[in-house]
Image: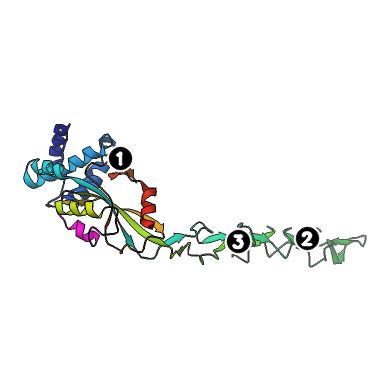
Amino acid sequence: MDIDLKSLASRLRGSVKVNSDRPQDYFNYIYPKIFTKNQEYFSNFSSEELLKVVLYVYSLKTTGDFKKAEDIFENLAFMIAFSTDDQVVSVDCNNCGGQGREDCDECSGSGNEECSDCDGSGNITCSECGGDGKSSDETDEEGNPEDCDFCDGEGQVECDNCGGDGRVDCRECDGTGGINCDYCDGEGEFEDEDLNFVYIYNIISWNPSLNDRAEIVEATKESLVPNLETLLEMDDVVVVQPTETREEEISEDYVDDEIYVYEYTDSPEIVPYNQHRTLNFRLKFPFQNFKNFIYM
């Protein structure tokens, strides 16, 4: 099968518009621009096979053969790492569902209310005849009052306030049907000081020193490196786009931005990962165990 993957890498070589010695740049290019754009075809490949294709292309583009990739495979290690961030976390308001608005209590969200001038009927008493439908100063030949010209003898005329609808815009919400949510002041979200950002990284490394360090600090509160930038500057490390989560009550022992290793292995279980139509990969991740770990 590796022969077929090498053949595929050779065909893809010209399509990879990367002029760099950094494998990170090849991952950043190939996964979204080739694998994802041709998802129907590449979805038939396993995550391990896609990883090999990327490294084969990287080896071909930088050395002209596959030896570098094969050397990498001999020293490859994987780790699940994470960092924390104390930036303010905003969460959707539960009261309004993040909309910032809620139904007006006065009109139950309809945006209108009963016209107070006509009590919702759409008509008011004719001011000319007082409602009896008869003229006060005109009579017929027999001396009987003529029908009121103003209301055509109906005794009622259309209400000017509501135009005959019987309903007018709600005074409380100006006809919108909604009012600003009291809980979030119309923002749709609020700051939650109890939440912290946690970024989870899948890291591929063939850096012997880094791998040794990862094995030592695995599942401890000792950091692997000071920050993500340190990893990204290494030529023998690839960092897969992080997953962001928000967690409560993270241990205060973790220093923001420093990278900590949750799990280190040289024989990982890689599972397919397809999020937002992006082909990628991730290590099998016991998330609940991780949540318990970072609270300690």
Q: Secondary structure at mark 3?
A: loop
For the residues labelled 2 and 3, the Cα–Cα distance comes to 32 Å
- Residue on which disc 2 sits: 156
The residue carrying mark 3 is 104
Is the Cβ of the residue at disc 3 closer than 8 Å to that at disc 1? Answer: no
Q: Which residue is mark 1?
A: 272
Give the residues in magenta.
218-235
Q: Nearer the viewer, mark 2 or mark 1?
A: 1
- State which tag comes first along the sequence, 3 or 1: 3
Q: Is residue 260 visible?
A: yes
Q: Residue furthest left?
A: 64
Q: Secondary structure at mark 2?
A: strand
Q: Position of residue 153 (x, y in %)?
A: 81, 59
Q: Is residue 243 above or below residue 13?
A: below
Residue 100 horizontal side relative to residue 241, left or right: right
Query: Residue 244 lies in magenta, yes or no?
Result: no
Q: Amino acid at mark 2?
A: Gln
Which circle, 3 or 1, is nearer the viewer?
Answer: 1
Q: Position of residue 243 (x, y in %)?
A: 33, 52
Residue under the point 23% across and 57% down: 224
Q: Earlier in the sequence, mark 2 or mark 1?
A: 2
For marks 2 and 1, give the CA distance. 74 Å
Please give left or right for residue 48 compared with residue 184 in the image.
left
Horizontal side of 173 relative to 31 (left or right) equals: right
Q: Is residue 231 magenta?
A: yes
Q: Main secondary structure of the magenta part?
A: loop
Residue in view at x 78 percent, y 60 percent: 156
Q: Are marks 2 and 1 in contact (CB under 8 Å)?
A: no
